[in-house]
């Protein structure tokens, strides 16, 4: 379930928008496969490079929100719709260093691509297990 709270913009005077809250149930399946390897580094650490690829199948359709100009509370407003691709390719590559002294480090790049859609993300994480 995806939900967006209502909000009212400020700073644009008569062009401020009041956006109504919106919610929708999203059905998604993501079959994927990951390959990787554990490579010992010295006595206490392991390098774990990995790559994954998958397909995200969405049955939720589009995301829509109803808005109106904030200065016109009695108006019906308008509905803005954002299409969500039905199929996305999901790809990730990265590496992790696991250390027996409770420290972990991870670097990762992920991409999601589909018809008229592209998303790229990078991740760096330093963790301490206690």
Image (cartoon, helix red, strand yellow):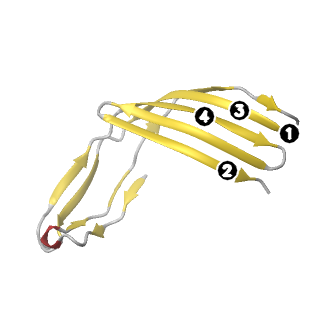
Vertical relation: 56 (above or below) 17: above
Is residue 40 among the parts visible in the rendering? yes
Q: Pointers 3 and 2 in contact (CB under 8 A)? A: no
- Mark on residue 89? none
Q: Secondary structure at mark 2?
A: strand
Spot occupied by residue 72 in the image (x, y as percentages of width and height) = 12, 73
| On-image quarter of the C terminus | bottom right
To which quarter of the image does residue 4 belong?
A: bottom left
Question: In terms of sequence position, does the residue under pointer 4 or pointer 3 come before the other?
Answer: 3
CB within 8 Å, label 2 to label 4: no
Question: Is the Cβ of the residue at disc 4 closer than 8 Å to that at disc 3?
Answer: no
Instruction: Quote the CA–CA distance across marks 1 and 3.
Output: 13 Å
Q: Residue at x 85, y 33 (%)?
A: 42
Residue at which label 4 appears: 94
Label 3: few (<14), some or many (≥20) within 10 Å? some
What's the distance in space between the residues labelled 2 and 4, CA to CA? Answer: 14 Å
68, 37: nearer the viewer: 37
Q: Is residue 84 left or right of residue 66?
A: right
| Count of numbered badges drawn on the protein | 4
Q: Residues within 10 Å of mark 2 (few under 14, many from 20)?
A: few
At x 75%, y 29%, the residue is 38
Q: Secondary structure at mark 3?
A: strand
Task: Tell me the number on the disc at residue 44.
Answer: 1
Residue that carries the numbered disc 2 in the rendered image: 126
Q: SS for tag 4?
A: strand
Asked if the residue under mark 1 is in contact with the one under mark 4, i.e. CB atoms within 8 Å, the reply is no
Q: Position of residue 57 (x, y in %)?
A: 42, 32
Q: Earlier in the sequence, mark 2 or mark 4?
A: 4
- Residue 92 x %, y %: 54, 32
């Amino acid at each position: 379930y995806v939900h967006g709270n209502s909000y009212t913009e400020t700073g644009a005077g008569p062009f401020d928008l009041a956006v109504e809250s919106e919610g929708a149930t999203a059905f998604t399946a993501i079959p994927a496969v990951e390959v990787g390897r554990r490579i010992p580094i010295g006595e206490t650490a392991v390098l774990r490079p990995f790559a994954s690829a998958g397909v995200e199948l969405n049955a939720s359709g589009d995301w829509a929100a109803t808005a109106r100009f904030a200065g016109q509370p009695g108006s019906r407003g308008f509905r803005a719709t954002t299409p969500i691709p039905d199929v996305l390719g999901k790809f990730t590559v990265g590496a992790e260093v696991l250390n027996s002294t409770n420290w972990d480090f991870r670097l990762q790049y992920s991409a999601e691509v589909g018809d008229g859609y592209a998303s790229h993300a990078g991740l760096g994480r330093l963790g301490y297990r206690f």
